Amino acid sequence: VNGDGKPDIIVANADSNNVGVLLNIGIGTFSAQTTYSTGIWPGSVVAADVNGDNKPDIIVANSNSNNDRVLLNKGNGTFQTQTTY
């Protein structure tokens, strides 16, 4: 997600109501998890470029609410505050 060509990890933390991003720092190791607040019980996450800037954004489907959240990629491995749809 930070554009360095190494696959990073994005995970839904349902009990904590957030998603976590772990950046790949090489040779099978990852940074400590950075978390981003979401709605109640994030059930699914996907990375996709939703705004056409060639950076993978995070889309979150929340299991216990009738909405989805989008976190836009800032390009440096961090994300903007969520937008609710």
Image (tube, helix red, strand yellow):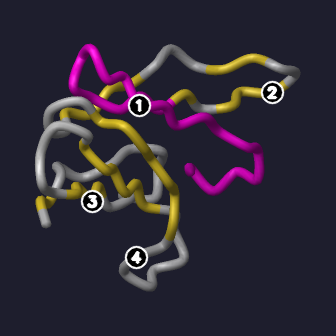
The stretch of residues the image draws in magenta is 1-21
- Rounded to the nearest angstrom, the CA distance separating label 2 from label 4 is 27 Å
Query: Where 23 falls versus 70 (above or below)?
Result: above
- Rounded to the nearest angstrom, the CA distance separating label 3 from label 4 is 9 Å
Mark 1 against mark 2, which lies toward the viewer? 1
- Between disc 1 and disc 4, whose residue precedes? 1
* Dot 2: element: strand
Kindly identify which residue carries mark 1.
12
Whether 19 is among the magenta residues is yes
Q: Contact, CB < 8 Å: mark 1 with mark 2?
A: no
Q: Amino acid at mark 1?
A: Ala
Q: Position of residue 52 (x, y in %)?
A: 44, 85
Q: Contact, CB < 8 Å: mark 1 with mark 4?
A: no
Kindly identify which residue carries mark 4.
50
Q: Position of residue 36 (x, y in %)?
A: 26, 34
Q: Is residue 61 left or right of residue 82?
A: right
- Between disc 3 and disc 4, whose residue precedes? 4
Q: Amino acid at mark 2?
A: Gly
- Between disc 2 and disc 4, whose residue precedes? 2
Q: Position of residue 71 (x, y in %)?
A: 29, 55
Kindly identify which residue carries mark 2.
26
